[in-house]
Image (cartoon, rainbow, N blue to C red):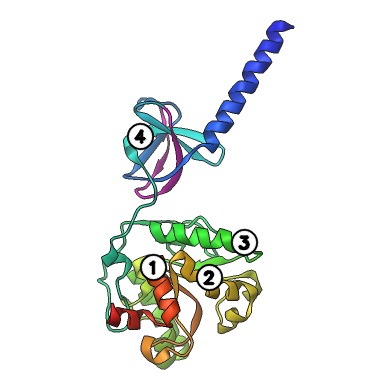
Amino acid sequence: MKVIAAFFIVCLFFSAYVTEAATNTIAGYTLQSTKLYGRAMQTSPVLKTLPKNTPVQYSVYNRSWSNVYIGNTRYFTPSTNLKAGIPKLSSTERLRLVNKQHGLSKTYRSSQLVPLTIPTVYAKGSERTLMAAEAAHALARLYYDGQKQGHTLYALSAYRSYRTQQSLYTYWVNARGTAYASMYVARAGHSEHQTGLAVDMTSQRMQLGLAASFDQTPEGRWMLANAHRYGFIIRYPKGKEAVTGYNYEPWHLRYVGVKEATTMKQNNWTFEEWWAKR
């Protein structure tokens, strides 16, 4: 009985240790394509491979290895693959002006693109569920804080490649005409979505679609009032159509950083107006 009791105590201790280790993790990201192993040995089988800049929760295992936690599963990887914190964009990339006058090349693609962790309308794996890591982290904070207030948001469309922009613009020109398309859809290379810093948000109340009435819903009102606290601006605000060149889009967020977003909010400036005064 004493042996059984001792064994039971050891099991409890080990269970508590694993639970504690899993909770005392560091938020970080991968510095390169990162192989995850079942043991702290590079000769053991590779169980998963994570791309560069993927957000992870990890803890130090020994001098050379760290634990990476995905769900309830613990993996091992060399510590040199990981860095604490969030990948940061340069100010040039974060504050890049993209509009009808300023475009991007066909080949432009942020090196920071990672899958969004919040609920998305498109299936995970779609390019539209990708966003630059710094912006994706900020969007997750916005989402979870909104959820605490009873507002559940969904990301409809984030990153769009040049090819996707071409297809989308052509579709709307054919469906509604050039005049309509030019007020709602950017020509290829002129969409903020290609930066990886823009995302269209929606809710179940909007049937996961986009409409100007989003600003009349509890979710939309909360987002419009608080987006700047997480570094986002409403990129195409009401009454500023002549400045932005696009109709009002209460669903379209653009990440610029907390300081800049707060300044634009306080002064009722569009990105173009802030850009001219910077």
Q: Which residue is at 57% across, 38% downward?
A: 72
* Of labels 4 and 1, the one closer to you: 1
Q: CA distance from mark 3 to mark 2?
A: 13 Å
Residue type, mark 3 in image: Gln
Say which amino acid is labelled 4.
Ser
Q: Position of residue 165 (x, y in %)?
A: 37, 74
Check whether the beta carbons of the residues at disc 4 and disc 3 lie within 8 A of each other.
no
Q: Secondary structure at mark 2?
A: helix
- Quadrant of the rendered image containing residue 6: top right
**Which mark sits nearer the N-terminus, 2 or 4?**
4
| Residue annotated with mark 1 | 259
Is 155 situated above or below 7?
below
Tags 3 and 2 touching, CB below 8 Å: no
Residue 79 position within the rendered picture, expressed as x and y whole percent measured from the top left: 35, 34
Three-letter code, disc 2: Asn
Question: Pointer 2: what residue?
Answer: 226
Question: Relative to the observer, which residue lies in front, 157 or 7?
Answer: 7
Mark 3–mark 1 Cα distance, whole angstroms, equals 24 Å
Distance, label 4 to label 3, CA atoms, is: 34 Å
Disc 3 or 2, which lies upstream in sequence? 3
Estimate the spatial distance between the alpha carbons at disc 4 and disc 1, rounded to whole Å. 33 Å
Is 150 left or right of 75, judged from the image as shown? right
Mark toward the viewer: 3 or 2: 2
Number of the label disc, if any, that sits on residue 18: none
Mark 1 residue element = helix
